[in-house]
Amino acid sequence: MKSSTRNPNPNPDTPRFGPSKLMLAFRFLRALTLVHRTAPNSSNAARSRRIQRAAFASMAYSAGPRRAWSRALLCRLHFHRARRRCARRSRAAGVPRRPSTTRSPADGLRRLVPGGTGMDYCSLLEETADYIRCLSEQVKLMQSIVDSVGPGGR
Amino acid sequence: MDPPSLMPRLPDMCRFPMLGMPPPELAPRVGRIGGDASVEESTVTEQCGGSKGRWRRRDPPSSGGATEAESSKLVSTSSGNELAEAEAKHLKAIKSTDGNDNIKSEAEASSGICNKLAAQNPQTTEPPKQDYIHVRARRGQATDSHSLAERARRDKISERMKILQDLVPGCNKVIGKASVLDEIINYIQALQRQVEFLSMKLEAVNSPMNTTIEVFPSKDFSSQRYDTTSSLAYSSQTWEYEQGSGTEWLHMQVGGAFERVT
């Protein structure tokens, strides 16, 4: 299955850039083929959901654990996966329904960006910027895949 | 006028080593046009508690209406932009209250975050080297520790908003924080919808995908082999998982053995 040999790190001082497009592409493609191979008979909606989850997972993995939103996204994904497999252990990750009378300007943003609820405004803006970069990379990648496959899909 | 008001505050001032300078020195300095006085006084006021705030606050009202005229002139002639806003805010606060209400709030505020501002203060009080009223306003604004911290925070926020505006296309035309935020929210929602739509499309292209995928990576990524090593190194710093997956990718490249990965 997966090879266990590890490559030694040749360049220890790589600059920190945004989402690594290559890793994103690799991960997403691998996840995509996994989805196609393991469940060829499931319904279309379920498969598209899985693809979407794979897209977000590959996005979060390639972004790295430095970002709060990628961590939160992965937590959410793992939680959902665990919840599907076993019985419901805890509802700790459920979003608390807090009816806020005063609407702060960042509320909508907090709901959109994963992990945005527990952050101050400053870091929320930074996470949003990184999230937007990763999302647009992901969209470009998926679009290029769709384009490369060609109009004759099935 | 000023020295007598300084006298009762002496016991407070003598508590701190910074206030080792004799009080008569302060009196001429207060009236002098200079940045040093403002630095000393404001650092003095920084390190003290609310009592200094009280001392400062009481001066402007005692001078009467003359301050207001000069302070308004001051606001227009002040050099730094941020200083002008903060000073205007501070002066408005002076005008609006009698001084006593302000004293307590200022005292509480300044006693809270004194130490932090002592470090920031020398830098912020350097630029305004104008007249007496300006100095007084700078001191007041400096002890308003909340305003300094808030200003730093606001600068950070505005800088990040600018980055976001550059990221989101079409955000430059909108003016106002709220609308920019709305635009950003719409853009993120659109991106997420696009991911969903593309995932549906990808799911629809099923069988030809399996064969194409195996060809695709080796075809397109062979030219970027050097980029892989750097990205591999980057990812291996952060996450072990990616290290293993990178090795598998190299296997894929070499033998086209994509099956080995899965």
Image (cartoon, coloured by chain):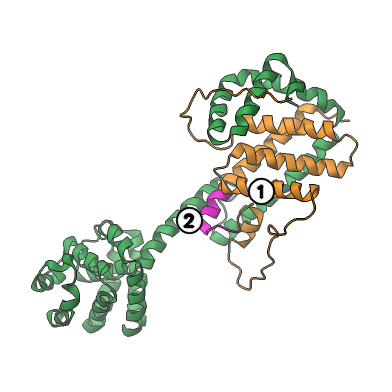
- How many marks can you see? 2
Q: Report x, y in % for residue A143.
A: 73, 35
Give the residues in magenta.
Answer: A117-128
Q: Report x, y in % for residue A87.
A: 80, 53
Q: Amino acid at mark 1?
A: Cys
Q: Is residue B211 one of those drawn in magenta? A: no
Q: Which residue is mark 2?
A: B157
In the rendered image of this protein, does residue B34 appear above or below residue B9?
above
Residue located 67% across and 71% down the image: A99
Dominant SS of magenta comes to helix
In the rendered image of this protein, does residue B141 appear above or below residue B171?
below
Q: Report x, y in % for residue B25.
A: 9, 70
- Please tell me which residue lies in front, B226 or B95: B226
Q: Are marks 1 and 2 in contact (CB under 8 Å)?
A: no
Residue located 50% across and 51% down the image: B160
Judge left or right: residue B189 versus residue B178. right
Q: Which residue is mark 1?
A: A75
Q: Is residue A118 one of those drawn in magenta? A: yes
Figure quadrant of residue B80:
bottom left
Q: Amino acid at mark 2?
A: Ile
Q: Colour of chain A?
A: orange
Q: Secondary structure at mark 1?
A: helix
Judge left or right: residue B95 versus residue A57. left
- Please tell me which residue lies in front, B30 or A15: A15
Q: Secondary structure at mark 2?
A: helix
Work out which quarter of the rendered image holds the N terminus of chain B and state it: bottom left
The chain letter for the residue carrying disc 1 is A
Q: Report x, y in % for residue A30.
A: 73, 30
Q: Which chain is green?
A: B
Residue located 57% across and 48% down the image: A68
Camera sees residue A33: yes
